[in-house]
């Protein structure tokens, strides 16, 4: 059965790739597949599932995937699926870690703008949950206590320790951009701050869901996140509670300023 909307299709695709990834992990446990081989097996299997389903359900749409050759055709296409078949590949290869995700987003060209993300889904298969733009998450109220900043556990931005100090915040390291965005809409962190490198597929689906949930999303300097650019590098982002955005962006600007002026 074909899902009736792009939102529902994004959700179904992310869930199906997630099930395939759980199977890869389960069979790895019995075959001894580990490390880079397990990462490669996961990337390849999830890419295969998503490619087959997109070709079946949306044959006219273009695709930008971390795991497939890029094509200039997407730059003139009206609709482009931006997918990360396995985000948090490192954590996927470290069972029983559960901080990895499947990202499926749809970018659509507007009649008068640069285009925007119009649907998205983030599956967290090892946690048995999928978030999508068809049922935007409801962000709980911030609990008492210091701000919590979700950051990469392996490649946090250079300035985050100083940023946390300046804000009196705690750092919450975890894998996967999708999982970190989910930690914000689940109320487990107040912001996700990243800098130093990333690609459109790392953030497109999480940003689509975060926006649907009413969260602030931008580059570190507050500029908008723009997708389906010729160069898919999109090296930094901030996702946070909307009432925190001005404070956080001001504090980040101060840190970046210090980095620039440091000898
Ligand atoms: N400095 C950097 N350069 C390039 N990609 C980066 C990066 N830091 C994080 N990423 C990518 O962003 C995703 C989330 O990273 P992290 O878990 O460290 O927060 C990962 O995607 P993949 O797992 O799809 O490769 C990772 O490769
Ligand atoms: Mg990724």
Image (tube, helix red, strand yellow):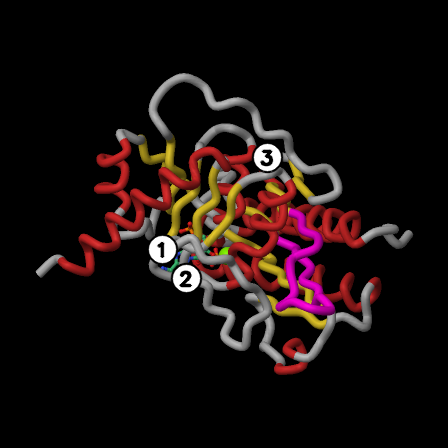
Q: Residue furthest bottom?
A: 72
- Is any part of residue 120 visible from this angle? yes
Ligand 1: does it lie within 8 Å of the C-beta at label 2? yes
Residue 28 in the image: state x and y as whole percent: 56, 50
| Residue marked by disc 2 | 235
- Mark nearer the N terminus (1 vs 2): 1
Q: Which mark is residue 195?
A: 1
Few, some or many residues within 10 Å of mark 1 (<14, 14–19, 20+): many
Q: Secondary structure at mark 1?
A: loop
Q: Which residues are magenta?
A: 103-121
Residue that appears at 36% across and 38% down: 247
Residue that appears at 50% across and 37% down: 242
Q: Are marks 1 and 2 in contact (CB under 8 Å)?
A: yes
Q: CA distance from mark 1 to mark 2?
A: 6 Å
Residue that appears at 71% across and 76% down: 77
Residue 31 in the image: state x and y as whole percent: 55, 51
- Mark nearer the N terminus (2 vs 3): 3
| Residue marked by disc 3 | 127
């Amino acid at each position: 059965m074909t899902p009736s909307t792009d939102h529902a299709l994004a959700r179904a695709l992310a869930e199906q790739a997630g099930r395939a990834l759980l199977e890869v992990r389960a069979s790895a446990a019995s075959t001894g597949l580990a490390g880079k081989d397990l990462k490669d097996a996961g990337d390849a299997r999830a890419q295969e599932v998503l490619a087959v389903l997109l070709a079946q359900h949306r044959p006219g749409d273009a695709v930008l995937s971390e795991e497939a050759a890029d094509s200039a055709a997407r730059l003139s296409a009206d609709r482009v699926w931006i997918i990360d078949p396995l985000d948090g590949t490192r954590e996927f290869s470290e069972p029983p870690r559960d901080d990895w995700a499947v990202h499926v987003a749809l970018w659509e060209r507007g009649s008068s703008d640069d285009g925007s993300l119009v649907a998205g889904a983030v599956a967290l298969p090892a946690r048995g949950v999928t978030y999508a733009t068809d049922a935007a998450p409801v962000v709980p109220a911030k609990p008492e206590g210091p701000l919590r900043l979700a950051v990469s556990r392996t490649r946090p931005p250079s300035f985050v320790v100083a940023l946390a100090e300046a804000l009196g915040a705690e750092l919450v390291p975890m894998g996967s951009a999708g999982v970190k965005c989910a930690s914000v809409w689940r109320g487990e962190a107040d912001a996700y701050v990243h800098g130093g490198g990333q690609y459109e597929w790392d953030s497109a689906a999480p940003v689509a869901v975060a926006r649907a949930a009413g969260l602030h999303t931008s580059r570190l300097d507050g500029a908008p996140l723009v997708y389906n650019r010729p160069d898919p590098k999109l090296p930094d982002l901030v996702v946070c509670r909307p009432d925190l955005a001005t404070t956080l962006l001001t504090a980040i600007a101060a840190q970046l300023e210090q980095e620039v002026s440091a000898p």
